[in-house]
Image (cartoon, helix red, strand yellow):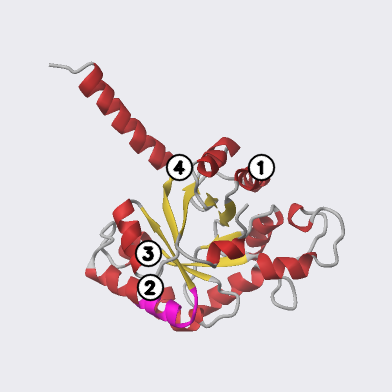
Amino acid sequence: MLGIQPLLAGEGPRFGSIVQVPHPLVVEAYGRAGFDFVILDQEHGPLSTDRLGDLVRAAEASGVVPLVRVPENRPSLIGAALDQGARGVVVPGIRGVEDARAAVEAARYPPEGQRGYCSAVRSAGILPDAQAATRANREVCVFLLIETLGAVDAVDDIAQLPGADVLFVGPGDLSAQMGVPGQLSHPDVERAVEKVAERALARGKTLAVHVRDVDTAARYVRRGFRVVSFGIDLQILTLHLREVGAALRGRVWPTA
């Protein structure tokens, strides 16, 4: 399986998608399709913590890196996702550098952070392991969602934080905050994205983004984004079903 460090290192971009349907078969489908990672979505999808373990196992068995978007920036939620074996957490609600620092600390054990330790969890191997905390601090990745105006304003400080591994730009939320919801190519949104990209790359941070079409993905990769999330499972399925349905009605049994 592609580990979290190879996901962020090496040549070329990495492609994944958001999973909201809480079933292992959906995760396996992404592995069979050759995706690099999945984002198990607890913020907007009906994914409970007790289902995460099954979805993480499906990702591991299918060769995709399991990330979890937690519902909010709380230590207990970040710790629970990592305890289930997530290789990284995608953290929303970043409004400034203090929020970013809190997320980083919640994802790492002392002395680097404040994550609570328990050996009897999946990520630690169930049995006592003196190296589990050190290994987790080295391998776990923190993706900070830059999707508020406060986060954009504070991006210089956020990009300097040790342990803030990936800055994940959210053009959709930024457009809403700027009063132009859904206008992802609006000049104000573009300027904010460019500011984040410039500051992140200057500090050696990895950039991530979520897109809805291939052309936009290519444009972001050219701008230096290396982690690209494409679509949401249910949206992808619905769009494909719509195309198939239209083709069946239009070509197989056309109406007058």
From the viewer's perspective, is 194 left or right of 89? left
- Main SS category, magenta section: helix
Residue nearest the viewer, comparing 133 with 173: 133
Q: Secondary structure at mark 1?
A: helix
Which circle's residue, 1 or 2, is located before the other in the chain? 1
Task: Residue under label 1, please give it.
Answer: 54
The image's mark for residue 149 is 2
Expressed as whole percent of the image width and height from the top left, the position of residue 99 reads 54, 74
Q: Position of residue 144 (x, y in %)?
A: 51, 68
Q: Whole-percent x and y of residue 94?
A: 49, 70
CA–CA distance between discs 2 and 3? 23 Å
- Spatial separation of the CA atoms under disc 4 and disc 1: 17 Å
Q: Residues within 10 Å of mark 4 (few under 14, many from 20)?
A: some
- The residue type indicated by label 4 comes to Asp
Kind of residue indicated by mark 2: Leu
Q: Amino acid at mark 3?
A: Val
- Can residue 115 be seen in the rendering of this structure? no
Label 2, label 4: how far apart the Cα atoms are: 28 Å
- Bin the neighbour count of mark 1 within 10 Å (Cα to Cα): few under 14, some 14-19, many 20 and up: some
Which quadrant of the structure image shows residue 200? bottom left
Badge 3 is on which residue? 221
